Image (cartoon, rainbow, N blue to C red):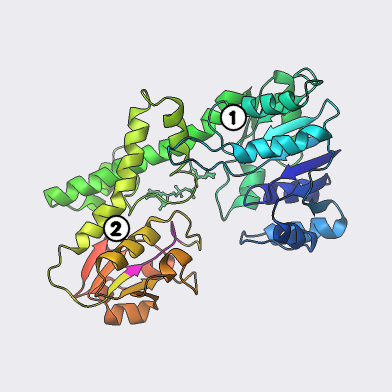
Amino acid sequence: KTVAVIGLGYIGLPTAAILATNGTTVIGVDVNPNTVDAVNRGEVPFVEPDLGQHVSKAVAEGTLKASLETPPADAYIVAVPTPFNDDKSADLSYIEAAGTNIAPQLRGDELIILESTSPPGATQHLADHILALRPDLSLDNLLVAHCPERVLPGRVMIELVTNDRIVGGITPEAAWAARDLYQRFCEGEILLTDAVTAEMAKLVENSFRDVNIAFANELSVISDKLGINVWELIKLANHHPRVNILQPGPGVGGHCIAVDPWFIVAAAPEEAKLIRQARETNDAKPEWVIDQVAKEQDATAPIAVFGLAFKADIDDLRESPAVHIAGDLADQYTDRTILAVEPHIDTLPKQLANRRNIELASIEDALEQAGTVLILVDHSQFKALETTAFDGKHVVDSRGLLNRA
Ligand code: SAJ
């Protein structure tokens, strides 16, 4: 049985590789010729531990090939992006394009799985889109399901195997068929439901985290006003057996938690009040952090930002509040140099590189030159510093790095 994986990104390529190393014949499809060429050479175009070995092994054994064209296959896994539009509604054009390319290849009885994080109804929309192009087929002979991924970047090859998996079918037959496919590599529990519940489950998981981070971020702003230490406050409250408050930060980054709750808001704008408010609270946090810099009057020395990544110990700068803060500081303090300390990169991302008063700096140089320091990411390299390293500086510690026991 051949499986075609549409979209060879952070989820599609690991899924293709793990299926292929488990003996399934896999054709990976991507619109980017560089990605297709890299995979066919057995290489991986981005960083993810252990993925390289899986891809090179599968390509060498002939079970994994990449292509620009969607081939005939027994099963299709769609793992394309679902960005949102300016009005926060989901952009389903990549999913529709995948459906358009799959439709002419179908003979009936194929399984089509949507893995992309999707607003409620997207799987049904994909099925309708394909059936409109192929009126000769119906849901009696086409199996369409949604199986959201929940792997954590950096642990993808482990979590693909060990995480429990939700499988939601447009029909029960579709869910059964998808379960059989995931059983080839997934050792976690496979939980069957309908497609729209599976779509919501993924969105709800990330919204749960967003709402809880918003609570922590709101506490940090309240604590600042009341003159108390939020890190001590949370640590004390968390001694209660049923309280587990998350950590405040400079805002929420990454392309899941800051995006997915909007899909719920778009689906139920009147009802999703708390979910919307959590998004707005987290999105407002970078500005609040920037405002803390102005509490220091008449300063002229460089401002150092410690960390640009969206969270600790990764090199991923996408949707990072730290990048946003560094850029805004450069615009706001045009007469001061912004020293960006990010041990995981050696060139500034392009949204920062175009500003003349921002440069990458080492930890040592930043500590020597800066008068103001913003701690935006709790990278291990920063945690390893003595707290006295920041003595004499105006420190805006958005992660509570200096308050850790
Ligand atoms: N953050 C805080 N305080 C906290 C925890 C996180 O400010 O106490 C911030 C982080 O610094 C970061 C953001 O939230 O900017 C998101 O980080 P994260 O580690 O919570 O999550 P992601 O985006 O790396 O991965 C999440 C995971 N979802 C959940 O934990 C519910 C992952 O399992 C999903 O697969 C992934 O989203 C996804 O692809 O949806």
In the image, residue 271 lies at what x, y percent?
37, 23
Q: Which residue is mark 2?
A: 398
Q: Which mark is residue 122?
A: 1
Query: Relative to residue 197, is residue 302 drawn left or right?
Result: left
Residue 311 covered by magenta stretch: yes
User: Viewer-proximal residue, 228 or 133?
Assistant: 133
Is residue 243 at all visible to an observer of this figure? no
Marker disc for residue 356: none
Describe the element under mark 1 as helix, strand or loop. Answer: helix
Where is residue 156 shown, x and y percent of the image?
Answer: 61, 51
On the question of residue 316 being in view, the answer is: yes
Magenta span? 305-312
Disc 2 marks a residue whose amino acid type is: Ser
Place of residue 15 in the rendered image (x, y in percent of width and height, measured from the top left): 70, 46
Left of 150 or right of it: where is 381?
left
| Mark 1 or mark 2, whichever is nearer to me | 1
The quadrant in which the C terminus is found is bottom left
Residue type at mark 1: give it.
Ala
Q: Residues within 10 Å of mark 1 (few under 14, many from 20)?
A: many
Q: Main secondary structure of the magenta part?
A: loop
- Residue at x 50% of width, y 74% of height: 346
Q: Is residue 200 above or below residue 355?
A: above
Q: Is residue 52 left or right of residue 362?
A: right
The quarter of the rendered structure image containing the N terminus is top right
Residue 128 image offset from top left, x and y in percent: 67, 24
Find residue 342 and report its image quarter.
bottom left
Determine whether, in the image, residue 204 is placed left or right of residue 117.
Answer: left
* Residue at position x 22%, y 78% in the image: 301
